[in-house]
Image (cartoon, rainbow, N blue to C red):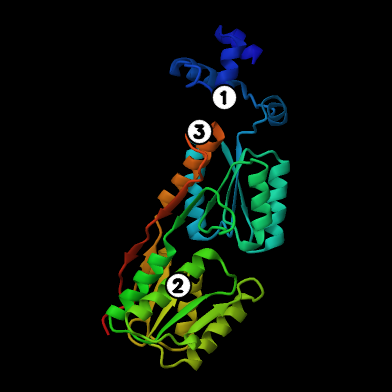
Amino acid sequence: MKDIADELGLSITTVSFVLNQKTEKMRISPETVKKVNDLIIKKGYKPNNAARVLRTGRSNTIALIVEDISNQFFGNVAKIIELIANRNGYKVFFSSTERDTQIAKSLISSMKQSAVDGFIITATGSLQEDISRLKNENIPFVLIDRILHDVDTDYVIIDNYLGGYQLTDHLTTQGYKKIAFITVTEGMSQLEDRRLGYKAALKDASIKQNEKYILEVPMVEKSHEEQLELMQRFFAENKDLDAVFFSTNYLGILGIEAIQLNKLKIGKDIAVVSFDDHDLFRLFTPSITVASQPLDQIGSRAIEILLKKLAKTSTTTTPVHEVLKPEIIIRDSSPKK
């Protein structure tokens, strides 16, 4: 910092403000900021992060812990979070839990030891103790995609009940009555809400719910081949089905494969809808009707809430509960019966 300050004729304090992203607060001119940053790049200056943490208590890093970063939903949300974080001087560490509780617990512990400033997490019920500990330790964090009912904290989610209801209502309005619901065995809050929406729409359409039309797929314990076989058997044993609602896009993709292997034609033999959009759903023939989530809004609101907590600019201590609405996109897989 002294070398940079001497070369540019600035004080070390001014250089420090630029390095620590305090330029706006300290009213450092954009011209000065550019001069400092240009010289930093020219000289290849790399701040010692460990020293910064010891000095300031801040690492300017954020941990993003999601179920599967390779999933299109989480990947797109992560891209938005990283973009906005970088604009505000933060780096993002990405990690996937692969739906494994022990991996999730280990990641939270490791990130805390790495002195990240805050977390954005897709949590499951099994993480309740770890999430409660973050809250008790006053470590800033925001939950996305799903919530923990016993931990009142900041979150950004979708109205999953509404999306589940609207998708099912679309099917019943199109004339379908024997509608399956395929989900996962793990009782995650967002999937439970989608199931409740499905059940409510059937009830409002005066369609008696048949429990044999609900399939729970073990995503952790079973291999892809075993999951596929389970779905194939389900469709073979329920030949009277006229429609199916997949609670996630990865189940929808797996389900399309199972339907094809069972020699069924989507849109003719069976209607298909899925929660979460995916590129494959747009490109597949027939294209798949979905409840699409506003990924840009989820990512931007999550990081904005966290940044306010980190900057301590929030005017209230009441947790932010952001519930966004899904968009029903009607395509060719659910024609009028």
The mark that comes first in sequence, 1 or 3, is 1
The mark that comes first in sequence, 2 or 1, is 1
> Which part of the image, by quadrant, shows the C terminus?
bottom left
Q: Of the numbered discs in the image, which one, if any, rests on residue 219?
A: none
> Which part of the image, by quadrant, shows the N terminus?
top right
The residue tagged with tag 2: helix, strand or loop?
Answer: helix
Residue 266: % across, % down: 37, 82
- Using the rendered image of the protein, determine whether residue 12 is visible from the camera's viewpoint: yes
- Mark 3 is on which residue type? Asn
According to the picture, the residue beneath numbered tag 3 turns out to be 88
Query: What residue is at 36 percent from the left and 85 percent from the top?
Result: 207
Callout 2 crowding tier (Cα within 10 Å): few <14, some 14–19, many ≥20: some
Question: Disc 1 and disc 3: Cα gap in Å?
Answer: 18 Å
Residue 198 in the image: above or below residue 238: above
Query: What residue is at 42 percent from the left and 54 percent from the top?
Result: 323
Query: What residue is at 65 percent from the left and 58 percent from the top?
Result: 127
Q: Is residue 168 left or right of residue 304?
A: left
Question: Disc 2 and disc 3: Cα gap in Å?
Answer: 39 Å
Asked whether the beta carbons under mark 2 and mark 1 sit within 8 Å of each other, the answer is no
According to the picture, the residue beneath numbered tag 2 turns out to be 196
Question: Disc 2 and disc 1: Cα gap in Å?
Answer: 54 Å
- Mark 2 is on which residue type? Leu
The residue tagged with tag 3: helix, strand or loop?
Answer: loop
According to the picture, the residue beneath numbered tag 1 turns out to be 41
Q: Residue furthest left?
A: 336
Q: Nearer the viewer, residue 298 or 31?
A: 298
Callout 1 crowding tier (Cα within 10 Å): few <14, some 14–19, many ≥20: few
Quadrant hosting residue 205: bottom left
- Using the rendered image of the protein, determine whether residue 83 is visible from the camera's viewpoint: no
